[in-house]
Image (tube, rainbow, N blue to C red):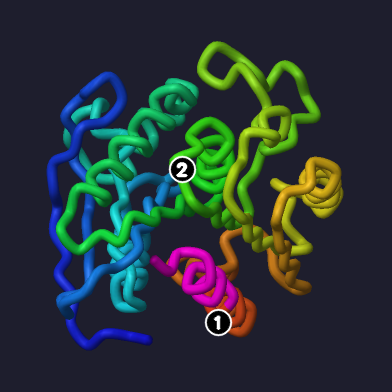
């Protein structure tokens, strides 16, 4: 069910180590208890498309919060801040997990919360969402949209900020999983998606993977021009909302 009204605003939240940061929070304006979604932004950062996606979740009946993972890097446009973060090698995994847990705590503290919270992410945020679900059992479900580097083929890609491949922590995932992937994507490749699925199956995890032909990376994102695939994106969103409605009911 879609609601006709929503409220969206920038809010303060407590992230990793109690650091005070900002997040975009959107919720339905209709009365009643709702489930929550912590949305993890992609590598470009806290940009217009991510903010619109947070509102999209609210329009479909969820309280959604997108923590600004780069708030420690200071002010500036999303492009400039994202460039600084990429030049520095990204943000540490521990910090991302802590920020996500703080964002989930913010959702659960709201009077409209039904207590259920999923984590969802795109691109690098998909990897982060997978990692968060592995390390933070308080999340009730995982939505992984083409998360790259969940499987790590080059050991030199691991470092102090990213010390472990998320797939090696998959036994820690407690809730159900949905994954959406483009078959033409190069990160993750179709083979890497196959290997991720094989691990989840071996571990007995509740998961569903959906793969789309004629789609590469970021096929939901209309701001990425030729990467966007309207038909696949519409179908993908329908599957995401069906998954969330099924698993996050109070």
Q: Is residue 159 magenta?
A: no
Precedes in sequence: disc 1 or disc 2: 2
Helix, strand or loop status at disc 1 = helix
Up the image or down, 12 lies above or below 175; here it is above
Residue for point 49% across, 23% down: 89
**Residue 219 position within the rendered picture, expressed as x and y whole percent measured from the top left:** 59, 67
The residue lying toward the viewer, choosing from 120 and 112, is 112
Q: Is residue 243 magenta?
A: yes
Residue for point 69% across, 34% down: 171
Residue for point 22% across, 88% down: 4
Up the image or down, 198 lies above or below 243; here it is above
CA gap, disc 1 and disc 2: 23 Å
Helix, strand or loop status at disc 2 = loop
Residue ID for mark 1: 234
User: Which span of residues is magenta-colored?
Assistant: 239-250
**Residue 196 position within the rendered picture, expressed as x and y whole percent measured from the top left:** 78, 45
Residue 28's image quarter?
bottom left
The residue lying toward the viewer, choosing from 203 and 56, is 203
**Residue 189 position within the rendered picture, expressed as x and y whole percent measured from the top left:** 78, 50
**Residue 179 position within the rendered picture, expressed as x and y whole percent measured from the top left:** 65, 59
- The quadrant in which the C terminus is found is bottom left
Residue ID for mark 2: 43
Q: Main secondary structure of the magenta part?
A: helix
Relative side of 17 to 216, left or right: left
Residue 77's image quarter?
top left
């Amino acid at each position: 069910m879609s609601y006709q009204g929503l409220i969206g605003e920038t809010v303060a939240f407590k992230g990793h180590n109690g650091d005070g940061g900002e997040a975009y929070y959107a919720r339905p304006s209709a009365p009643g208890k709702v489930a929550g979604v912590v949305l993890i932004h992609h590598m470009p950062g806290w940009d217009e498309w991510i903010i619109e996606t947070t509102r999209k979740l609210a329009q479909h009946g969820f309280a959604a919060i997108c923590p600004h993972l780069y708030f420690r890097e200071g002010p500036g446009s999303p492009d400039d801040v994202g460039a600084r973060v990429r030049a520095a090698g990204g943000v540490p995994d521990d910090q991302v997990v802590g920020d996500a847990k703080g964002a989930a705590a913010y959702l659960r503290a709201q009077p409209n919360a039904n207590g259920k919270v999923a984590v969802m992410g795109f691109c690098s945020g998909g990897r982060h969402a997978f990692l968060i679900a592995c390390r933070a059992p308080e999340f009730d479900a995982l939505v992984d949209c083409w998360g790259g580097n969940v499987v790590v083929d080059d050991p030199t890609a691991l470092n102090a900020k990213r010390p472990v491949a998320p797939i090696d922590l998959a036994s820690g995932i407690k809730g159900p999983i949905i994954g959406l992937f483009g078959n033409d994507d190069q990160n993750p490749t179709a083979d890497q998606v196959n290997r991720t699925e094989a691990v989840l199956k071996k571990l007995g995890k509740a998961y569903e993977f959906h793969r789309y032909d004629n789609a590469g990376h970021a096929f939901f994102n209309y701001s990425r021009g030729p990467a966007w695939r309207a038909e696949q994106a519409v179908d993908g969103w329908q599957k995401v909302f069906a998954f969330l409605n099924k698993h996050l009911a109070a």
